[in-house]
């Protein structure tokens, strides 16, 4: 995919860069061939920015559905917003009453439409707290039985309660993190919450192409929906998205790292997220037998900061060695072994401001990124 010049993407804070989707786009992934149903308040996304295959119900008069649709699939045309999966086919279904409120029977009917449309993914940025209607519950399960992935927001009242449809087994429940990869102070924290995505001060495009920053798990869910479209286009199981996540402070659930989840290739990958107090570094080591010689370090001016103590090695199917460098305070927060090789995510306490050259050397291969703290 060509370079992306959409204005909202080029802002200092880009949620697309935060989840490393640049890496997926550089592999030519854009959601082509994937069909997504957006069940919301409809859409008034302009044809200049989103290709909508079909729409059901009245056009959007609330604005919520338009924002969600743009997050998923806005074209990369230097106009306004850069969608996660601009090549996906979009079906919009207005299941609301016009005031942004939803009835479970209307949602059930919308899901039936999505099933008939044979979509791959349904996005429902809706949360309910009333008793679960049987017809709604059956429609959700019928959709999943048909092989449809359902992505839903978990809610914005910062408590342990998670409503429907995110609470239903098999539905992907999405919470929100801020610019620093820290859980948003409004995001639900209960079970089942499956994954986090950016959802604080997200630049969005609504009705009449009005641009505004919004916050909520309703914005995080379509980011995951778009990411799953890239997974499907790649021919991968969307559940693999959970194997490659960045650390979220004070949570056992991680944040989306779609660039690593879609990567195919022999070279190591390196990605970083700069937070207010911590730097999160993640790297993917392709499979190379059973032993990986790993050396990861950062250079600032003439100083070299060793980020893995003695260098050392990693054995497949064995715990990753501890990172012990005291000057950075490195904490291992997650790792994965398997057919994709080794995936690690580490949090580093940021101390000195400035520019660092971050380098990882794995079995003679090198990956480098510039970090500015």
Image (cartoon, rainbow, N blue to C red):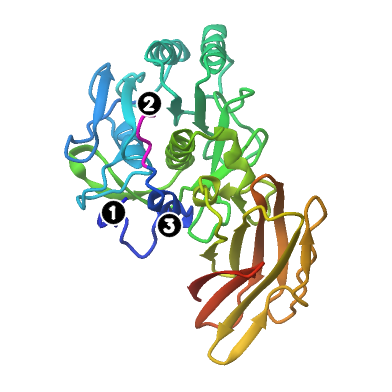
In terms of depth relative to the viewer, which is nearer, 36 or 11? Answer: 36
Q: Residue 67 location, x and y as percent?
A: 32, 38
Depicted 138 relative to depicted 317: above or below: above
Residue tagged 1: 2
Residue drawn 54% across the image and 24% down it: 165
Relative placement, left or right, of 127 versus 80 is: right
Is 32 covered by the magenta stretch?
yes
Q: Residue 225 location, x and y as percent?
A: 45, 35
Q: Characterize the local packing of mark 3: few (<14), some (14-19) or many (20 or more) Cα atoms within 10 angstroms.
A: some
Q: CA gap, disc 2 to disc 3? A: 24 Å
Q: Can residue 201 be seen here?
A: no
Main SS of residues in magenta: loop
Residue drawn 26% across the image and 40% down it: 206
Is 25 covered by the magenta stretch?
no
CB atoms of marks 2 and 3 within 8 Å: no
Q: Residue 319 location, x and y as percent?
A: 81, 56
Q: Secondary structure at mark 2?
A: strand
Q: Secondary structure at mark 1?
A: loop
Relative placement, left or right, of 128 versus 209 is: right
Depicted 158 relative to depicted 127: above or below: below
Query: Nearer the observer, disc 2 or disc 3?
Result: 2
Q: Which mark is residue 149?
A: none
Q: Characterize the local packing of mark 2: few (<14), some (14-19) or many (20 or more) Cα atoms within 10 angstroms.
A: many
Point out the tag, 3 or 1, that comes first from the N-terminus: 1
Query: Nearer the observer, disc 1 or disc 2?
Result: 1
Q: CA gap, disc 1 to disc 2? A: 23 Å
Query: Nearer the observer, disc 3 or disc 1?
Result: 1
Q: Can residue 352 be seen here?
A: yes
Which range of residues does the magenta coloring cover? 30-35
Residue tagged 2: 35
Residue tagged 3: 17
């Amino acid at each position: 995919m060509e370079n992306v010049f959409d204005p909202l993407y080029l802002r200092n804070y880009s949620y697309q860069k935060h989840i490393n989707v640049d890496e997926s786009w550089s592999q030519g992934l854009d959601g082509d061939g994937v069909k997504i149903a957006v069940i919301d308040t409809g859409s008034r996304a302009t044809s200049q920015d989103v290709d909508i295959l079909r729409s059901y119900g009245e056009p959007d008069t609330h604005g919520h559905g338009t924002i969600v649709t743009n997050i998923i699939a806005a074209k990369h045309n230097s106009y306004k917003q850069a969608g996660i999966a601009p090549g996906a086919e979009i079906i919009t279904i207005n299941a609301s009453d016009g005031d942004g409120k939803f009835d479970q029977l209307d949602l059930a009917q919308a899901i039936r439409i999505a099933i008939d449309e044979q979509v791959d993914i349904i996005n429902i940025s809706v949360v309910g707290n009333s008793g679960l209607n049987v017809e709604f519950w059956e429609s959700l399960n019928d959709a999943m039985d048909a092989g449809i992935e359902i992505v839903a927001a978990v809610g914005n009242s910062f408590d342990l309660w998670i409503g429907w449809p995110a609470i239903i087994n098999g539905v992907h429940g999405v919470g929100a993190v801020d610019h620093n990869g820290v859980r948003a102070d409004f995001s639900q924290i209960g079970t089942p919450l499956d994954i986090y995505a950016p959802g604080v001060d997200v630049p969005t495009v609504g009705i009449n192409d009005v641009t505004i920053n919004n916050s909520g798990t309703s914005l995080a869910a379509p980011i995951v929906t778009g990411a799953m479209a890239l997974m499907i286009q790649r021919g991968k199981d969307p559940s693999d998205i959970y194997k490659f996540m960045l650390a979220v402070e004070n949570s056992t659930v991680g944040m989306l790292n779609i660039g690593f989840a879609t990567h195919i290739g022999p070279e190591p990958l390196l990605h970083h997220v700069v937070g207010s107090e911590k730097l999160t570094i993640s790297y993917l080591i392709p499979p190379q037998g059973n032993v990986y010689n790993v050396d990861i370090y950062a250079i600032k001016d003439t100083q070299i900061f060793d980020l893995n103590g003695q260098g050392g090695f990693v054995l497949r199917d064995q715990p990753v060695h501890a990172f012990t460098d005291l000057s950075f305070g490195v904490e291992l927060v997650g790792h994965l072994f398997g057919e994709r090789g080794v995936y690690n995510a580490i949090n580093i306490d940021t101390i000195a401001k400035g520019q660092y050259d971050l380098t990882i050397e794995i079995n003679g291969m090198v990956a480098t990124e510039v970090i500015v703290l």
